[in-house]
Amino acid sequence: MIIRQYIQYAIASMSRDATELPLIMAIDQHASLPPWSQQQWMDSIAAEHLIFVCKHAEQVMGFLVMMPVVDDLEILSIAVSPQHQRQGCGSALLSFALDYAKQYGFRKLLLEVRASNNNAIHLYSKHQFKQTGLRKNYYRLSTGREDALLFEREIA
C-alpha cells in the first residue's frame, strides 16, 4: 500500500480486498459524467489498474485510476466527492500522480476531460497540463454527445 501525505490528505492505494470500492463508486456516481458501471470497475480491478484513494480523517473523499501505457501513464478517472471539491483533494491526487509518474520513470502523464468541465480544466492547467487534442462527440450523455479534450504533462 502506497501512502503519501499531501497537505491534509493521505493518498493510499485501494486495499487488496477493495473495501473502498462502494465509496469510490458512490463518489463516481455523483461527480462523474458519465460514471463508470459496476462492470467497468470490476474490469479495471481485474486489469490491475492503479487505483488510489484520497482520505482525510480516514474518510474517502476522492479517487484516482491510472494505467501504464508503454512509457506514459494515463489517468483513466479522477474524481472528488461534490461536498469536498475545491478543498485541495483533486490537487493532492494530481500531485501524487505526477510524483508517481516521476518515481517510476514515465515520460508523460495523459488524461481526457469533458469540454464543458471547466473546474477540471482549470485544475489541470494549474498543474501545467497542456491541451494536445480533441475527440469529437466522445462522451455519451443523457443530453447528447460531448467532445473530450486531451491533455498531457511532460514528466521532468
Image (tube, helix red, strand yellow):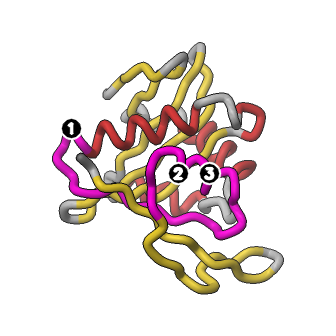
Q: Which span of residues is magenta-colored?
A: 102-130
- Tell me which amino acid carries mark 1: Gln
Q: Which residue is mark 2?
A: 124
The residue drawn where x is 59% and y is 13% is 57
Query: Residue 38's spot in the image, x, y percent?
Result: 58, 57
Looking at the image, do the residues carrying marks 3 and 2 touch, with CB atoms under 8 Å apart? yes
Q: CA distance from mark 3 to mark 2?
A: 6 Å
Q: Which mark is residue 93?
A: none
Looking at the image, do the residues carrying marks 1 and 2 touch, with CB atoms under 8 Å apart? no
- Tell me which amino acid carries mark 3: His
Badge 2 element: helix
The residue drawn where x is 74% and y is 74% is 141
Q: CA distance from mark 1 to mark 2?
A: 20 Å
Residue 78 within the magenta-colored segment of the rendering: no
Pick whichever, 28 or 103, lies toward us: 103
Q: Which mark is residue 103?
A: 1
Displayed quadrant of residue 71: bottom left
Badge 1 element: helix
Question: As drawn, is 53 to the left or to the right of 154?
Answer: right
